């Protein structure tokens, strides 16, 4: 795998992370109005009356990866080593400044110069890590990418999509692997009322189809030999771990395995058996079946009855700091299949 491939991966990651930061900063994108204030008025505001160390740490921590990724994404042969890090700080600080100014027109958000300072500090720290350690980390990234990822067109974008699929598991109110539900986004009514037997069948079909889709996706994307065989089951296990961690932290420790329902167990069983048989197919067949399974799962998600547990979980974790995180993870979960399917179609044409 060439060094350029590592740079492309860093650029995809930087772009995806930037879009997530923008969405989280402007969520819920509702109630826009002009309050008669200058968008720069927040720069002259005093120390905020209400603040916590947690708020400051989050504002620094969110922009630290952004500064790091931007610094790794920017290097080119004609730029001195220091300039990418400086550009990353300017871009990170400029993004934070722009978003704080735009928040002037969002009644649910309060622009803050303290947030701007913390965000910029995070970008500085991330860019500094990239400056002092980025080259070594970049070489390791390129090395492991060459060992784990197949030589495929736009493979880096596929890696980012699989990473975002793991992010979708951080939304505790969604079905297990139940991404692609457009009903809340478009205000559509439920197709059928909740009934335990029906819900169990639909849940099993969704989980199994998504195991097949994501497993075949990963199988094709990973390098031949051992990564291609152990990667798909490890990815599924990682997703279950993320789901359990999200439920434990965002809802309650006792709900860590609330996803372990009868429907989920049946879906994991039949999906795992089907995946074990289908991974042996040629690459073009794997991609075609992954796309079909992904479409089937997405259709079923939009027909599934509402799970009563989802509303209860959402009521618990939308409080406080989790409100913006909720919007971010839900949007990622809604859009993921509609980003993954075109990629699979593009990949299928190149095989």
Image (cartoon, rainbow, N blue to C red):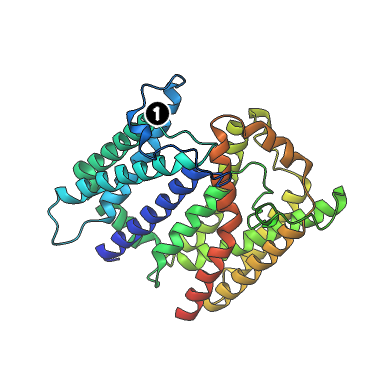
Find residue 171 and report its image quarter: top right
Q: Quadrant of the N terminus?
A: bottom left
Q: In this view, does 131 lie above or below 56?
A: below
The residue most toward the front is 36
Name the residue beneath numbered marker 1: 57
Across and down, in percent, residue 326 comes to 58, 41
* Nearer-the-camera pick, 40 or 177: 40
Q: Can you see residue 76?
A: yes
The residue most toward the top is 49
Q: Is residue 109 above or below residue 282?
A: above
Q: Residue at x 72, y 55 (%)?
A: 267
Q: Which residue is drawn at 40% across and 31% down?
A: 112
Across and down, in percent, residue 149 comes to 40, 63
Q: How crowded is mark 1: few (under 14 residues within 10 Å), some or many (20 or more)?
A: few
Across and down, in percent, residue 113 comes to 35, 31
Q: In this view, does 103 lie above or below 297?
A: above
Mark 1 secondary-structure assignment:
helix
Q: Which residue is drawn at 81% across and 58% down?
A: 191
Query: In the image, is 159 to the left or to the right of 309?
Result: left
């Amino acid at each position: 795998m060439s060094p350029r491939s590592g740079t492309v991966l860093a650029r995809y990651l930087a772009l995806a992370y930037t879009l997530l930061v923008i969405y989280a900063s402007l969520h819920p994108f509702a109630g826009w109005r002009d309050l008669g204030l200058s968008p720069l008025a927040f720069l002259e505001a005093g120390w905020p009356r209400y603040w916590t160390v947690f708020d400051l740490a989050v504002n620094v921590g969110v922009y630290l990866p952004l500064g790091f990724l931007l610094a790794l994404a920017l290097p080119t042969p004609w730029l001195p080593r220091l300039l990418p890090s400086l550009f990353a700080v300017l871009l990170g600080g400029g993004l934070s400044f722009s978003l704080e100014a735009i928040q002037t027109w969002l009644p649910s958000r309060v622009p803050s110069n303290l947030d701007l300072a913390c965000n910029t500090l995070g970008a500085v720290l991330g860019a500094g890590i990239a400056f002092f350690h980025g080259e070594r980390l970049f070489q390791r990234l390129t090395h492991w990418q060459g060992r784990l990822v197949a030589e495929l067109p736009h493979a880096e974008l596929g890696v980012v999509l699989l990473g975002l699929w793991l992010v979708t598991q951080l939304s505790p109110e969604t079905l297990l692997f139940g991404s692609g539900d457009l009903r809340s986004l478009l205000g559509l009514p439920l197709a059928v009322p909740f009934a335990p037997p029906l819900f169990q069948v639909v849940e099993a079909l969704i989980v199994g189809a998504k195991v097949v889709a994501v497993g075949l996706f990963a199988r094709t994307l990973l390098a031949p030999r051992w990564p291609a065989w152990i990667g798909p089951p490890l990815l599924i296990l990682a997703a279950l771990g993320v789901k359990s961690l999200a439920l434990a932290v965002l809802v309650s420790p006792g709900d860590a395995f609330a996803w372990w329902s009868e429907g989920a167990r049946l879906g994991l069983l039949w999906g795992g058996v089907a995946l074990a048989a289908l991974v042996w197919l040629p690459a073009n067949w794997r991609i075609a079946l992954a796309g079909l399974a992904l479409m089937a799962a997405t259709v079923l998600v939009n027909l599934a009855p509402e799970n009563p547990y989802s509303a209860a979980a959402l009521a618990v974790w939308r409080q406080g700091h989790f409100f913006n995180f909720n919007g971010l993870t839900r949007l990622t979960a809604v859009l993921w299949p509609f980003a993954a399917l075109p990629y699979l179609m593009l990949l299928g044409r190149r095989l």
